[in-house]
Image: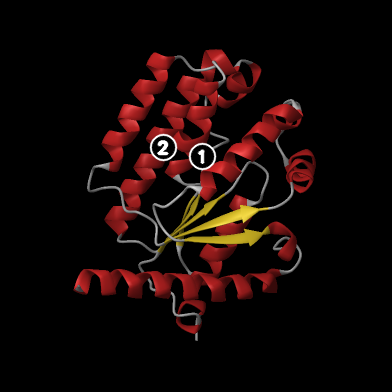
């Protein structure tokens, strides 16, 4: 019996892994996809032509960076739609607009015109048929000290040299964002409760919770549609 059958996870499920920088989204995404034999939708960070310039000058490059991420993520959404699900996503498209773009607008490192252009483009994308909403959003959370420690230990050089105040603001914004997120069901997991880097078996209780959440959500949706 494979993991999908064992934990009753539909083959066409779409699971998104969310959380602030350094929290372990890519590791979780790959572990879940491997266990479920799902495809991955990974954030194309290393191929991003704006990222290094962005960390050197937020105001100059924030709009370019966010537009690049938005375009790449929408292409991934379209691919998921065409495949009919069976994906685990590394970061959601909702985080781009709800956290990153808004943070730069609020801080004056993205102009009002650029922010409105970005937001209008995002709204138009969400309204297309190529935008499947996730069955479940897994939110990885931990203490701020744990997150900063991971950035210093495993992060890219440009992230390590970024002021701690930037990560602290992002951490707080993520907490506000997830507390108001309602686009799909949320499974919150504390990063202190598992260690996928050294203990592969720690994915099992997570898979069990994923199955329970998705089944509950689908039953609830079916019940609502039947009324």
Quadrant in the rendering for residue 157: top right
Question: Which residue, given by chain and number where applicable, does mark 1 sit on?
Answer: 44
Looking at the image, can residue 62 be seen? Answer: yes
Which residue appears at 68% of the width and 74% of the height?
Answer: 201
Residue toward you, 23 or 156: 23
Looking at the image, can residue 158 be seen? Answer: no
Residue 221 as seen in the image, left or right of residue 2:
left
Q: Position of residue 169 (x, y in %)?
A: 65, 32
Marks 1/2 in contact by CB < 8 Å: the verdict is yes
Tally the numbered discs: 2
Which residue appears at 74% of the width and 60% of the height?
Answer: 192
Colouring used for the render: secondary structure
Within 10 Å of disc 2 (Cα), the crowding (few <14, some 14-19, many 20+) is some
Q: Is residue 216 above or below residue 134?
A: below
Q: Position of residue 221 (x, y in %)?
A: 30, 69
Q: Position of residue 24 (x, y in %)?
A: 65, 51
Q: Is residue 161 above or below residue 207?
A: above
Residue that protrudes farthest toward the left in the picture: 227
Residue toward you, 148 or 156: 148
Q: Earlier in the sequence, mark 1 or mark 2?
A: 1
Which residue appears at 70% of the width and 58% of the height?
Answer: 191
Residue 60, numbered label:
none
Residue 200 as seen in the image, left or right of residue 18:
right
As helix, strand or loop, the secondary structure at mark 1 comes to: loop
As helix, strand or loop, the secondary structure at mark 2 comes to: helix
Question: Which residue, given by chain and number where applicable, does mark 2 sit on?
Answer: 72
Residue toward you, 26 or 208: 208
């Amino acid at each position: 019996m494979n993991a999908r059958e064992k934990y009753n996870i539909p083959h066409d499920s779409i699971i998104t892994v969310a959380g602030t920088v350094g929290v372990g989204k890519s590791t979780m995404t790959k572990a879940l996809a491997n266990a479920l034999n799902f495809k991955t939708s990974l954030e194309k960070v290393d191929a991003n032509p704006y990222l290094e310039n962005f960390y050197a000058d937020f105001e100059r490059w924030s709009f370019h960076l966010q537009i690049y991420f938005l375009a790449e993520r929408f292409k991934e959404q379209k691919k998921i739609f065409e495949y009919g699900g069976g994906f685990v996503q590394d970061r959601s498209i909702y985080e781009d607009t709800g956290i990153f773009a808004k943070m730069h607008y609020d801080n004056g490192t993205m102009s009002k015109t650029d922010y409105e252009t970005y937001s209008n483009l995002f709204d138009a994308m969400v309204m297309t048929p190529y935008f499947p909403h996730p069955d479940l959003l897994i939110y990885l959370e931990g203490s701020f000290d744990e997150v900063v420690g991971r950035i210093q230990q495993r992060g890219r050089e440009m992230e390590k040299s970024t002021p701690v105040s930037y990560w602290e603001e992002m951490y707080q914004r993520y907490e506000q964002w997830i507390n108001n997120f309602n686009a799909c069901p949320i499974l919150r997991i504390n990063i202190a409760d598992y260690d996928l880097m050294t203990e592969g078996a720690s994915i099992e209780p997570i898979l069990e919770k994923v199955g329970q959440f998705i089944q509950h959500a689908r039953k609830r949706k079916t019940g609502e549609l039947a009324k």
